[in-house]
Image: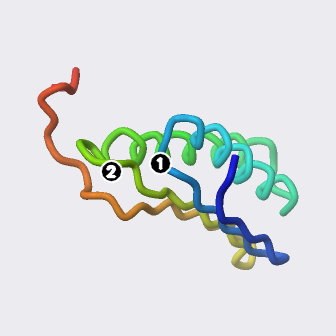
C-alpha cells in the first residue's frame, strides 16, 4: 500500500487514502509503534481498537459523496504516555440518508 510515512524514534506518522484497506494498515502500524514503545498488551490492544474505529469513521463519513482524501495517524511517546492522533481533511460527520443508524 502506498502512503506517506515517517518514523523517528519516539514519533511516527502515516497518511493513506481514506479507503477500507487503510483501516487494517493503519491499525497495524499504530499497534506496532505501541509495541516498539514498550506498551503493555492491554494498551496495544486499546490502540489497535481506537485506531480501527476512528479510521473507519474517517473512511465512512469524512468524504461521503466525494472522492476519498487522506486519513493520517500519528503516534508519539510523551513521558509515560502514548499519544495517538487520527485526522482527515473531510467534511465531518453529517446525517446520511443511507445510514442504518438512528
Q: Measured from the top left, where is residue 75 in percent x and y? A: 66, 66
Q: Residue at x 47, y 48 (%)?
A: 18
Give me the residue at 84% from left, 52% from top: 35
Quarter occupied by the C terminus: top left
Q: How many marks?
A: 2
Viewer-proximal residue among 100 and 21: 21
Q: Position of residue 85 (x, y in %)?
A: 54, 64
Q: Which residue is mark 2?
A: 62
Q: Position of residue 100 (x, y in %)?
A: 22, 21
Res 33 label: none
Residue at 85% x, 76% y: name it.
9
Query: Dot 1: few (<14), some (14–19), or many (≥20) neighbours within 10 Å?
Result: many
Mark 2 vs mark 1: which is more N-terminal? 1
Q: Would you identify the image quadrant in which residue 96 lies?
A: top left
89 displayed left or right of 40? left
**Toward the viewer: 84 or 43?**
84
The residue depicted at 77 percent of the width and 56 percent of the height is 34
Could you say which is closer to the camera, residue 69 or residue 57?
69
- Residue 70 is left or right of residue 44, and the answer is left
Question: Residue lying farthest top?
Answer: 100
Q: Are marks 2 and 1 in contact (CB under 8 Å)?
A: yes
Instruction: Give the distance between the C-alpha atoms of the residues marked 2 and 1, in whole angstroms.
Output: 8 Å
Q: Position of residue 51 (x, y in %)?
A: 57, 47
Secondary element type, mark 2: helix
Please give the residue where the numbered disc 1 appears in the rendered image: 18
Relative to 33, say whether 56 is above or below: above
- Dot 1: what SS? loop
Above or below, 95 against 88 in this view is: above
Amino acid at each position: 500500500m502506498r502512503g506517506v510515512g515517517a518514523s523517528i524514534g519516539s514519533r511516527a506518522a502515516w497518511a493513506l487514502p481514506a479507503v477500507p484497506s487503510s483501516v487494517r494498515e493503519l491499525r497495524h502500524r499504530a499497534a506496532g509503534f505501541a509495541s516498539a514503545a514498550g506498551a503493555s498488551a492491554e494498551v496495544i490492544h486499546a490502540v489497535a481498537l481506537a485506531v480501527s474505529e476512528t479510521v473507519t469513521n474517517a473512511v465512512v463519513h469524512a468524504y461521503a459523496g466525494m472522492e476519498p482524501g487522506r486519513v493520517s495517524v500519528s503516534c508519539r511517546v510523551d513521558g509515560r504516555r502514548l499519544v495517538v492522533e487520527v485526522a482527515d481533511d473531510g467534511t465531518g460527520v453529517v446525517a446520511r440518508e443511507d445510514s442504518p443508524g438512528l
